Amino acid sequence: MTGTLDTRPARPAAAEHHSVGELVGQATEQLSTLVRQELALAKEELAEKGRRAGRGGGLLGAAGAVGYVGLIALAGTGAAALSLVLPVWAAALIVTGALFVIAAVLAVAGRSQLRRATPPKPAQTINSVRADVEEIKGRAHR
């Protein structure tokens, strides 16, 4: 009752057996799809950062304009202070102070928008591509 032990590796089923050309074709197609998806992600991420930079720049521009008006009002305040006694220039000083407060609020909001828009690189896409490369390397070594 002695038998021989079959040491040959088991062959894959016919449905699982692919030629090298088919495997290369599948890999090329998958890589092409992956690259297209990563480019679409980068495009969307950069568009969002561009929108934020635009909003921040607009707010900073508005802050500059209101600040300029505040300087003009301050000049008017100084003239009123020299020509009249307390009531007129005190009123002008209050208006000037309010304009500078508005300019400061706009400047802080604009700076916040610009900080959220920088750095202008697609960080999510870069991280995703790195993960994809690591996955491909891992599968290639198996």
Image (cartoon, rainbow, N blue to C red):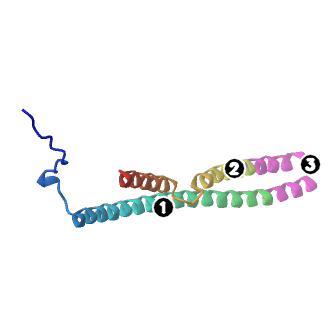
Residue drawn at x 19%, y 48% is 9
Q: Earlier in the sequence, mark 1 or mark 3?
A: 1
Instruction: Work out how far the residue at label 1 is from the one at label 3, CA to CA, in angstroms.
Output: 55 Å
Left or right? Give the position of 29 relative to 81: left
Q: Is residue 93 above or below residue 30?
A: above
Residue on which disc 1 sits:
47
Q: Residues within 10 Å of mark 1 (few under 14, many from 20)?
A: some
Q: Is residue 141 above or below residue 2?
A: below
Give the image location of residue 41, x and y in percent: 42, 58
Question: Was residue 97 drawn as part of the magenta stretch in this picture?
Answer: yes
Please name the amino acid that badge 2 sits on: Ile
Asked if marks 2 and 3 touch (Cβ < 8 Å), the reply is no
Q: Main structural element of the magenta stretch: helix, strand or loop?
A: helix
**Quadrant occupied by the N terminus:** top left
Residue on which disc 2 sits:
102
Question: Was residue 99 drawn as part of the magenta stretch in this picture?
Answer: no
Residue on which disc 3 sits:
85
Please name the amino acid that badge 3 sits on: Val
| Secondary element at image label 3 | loop
Please name the amino acid that badge 1 sits on: Ala
Which residues fall within the magenta stretch?
73-98
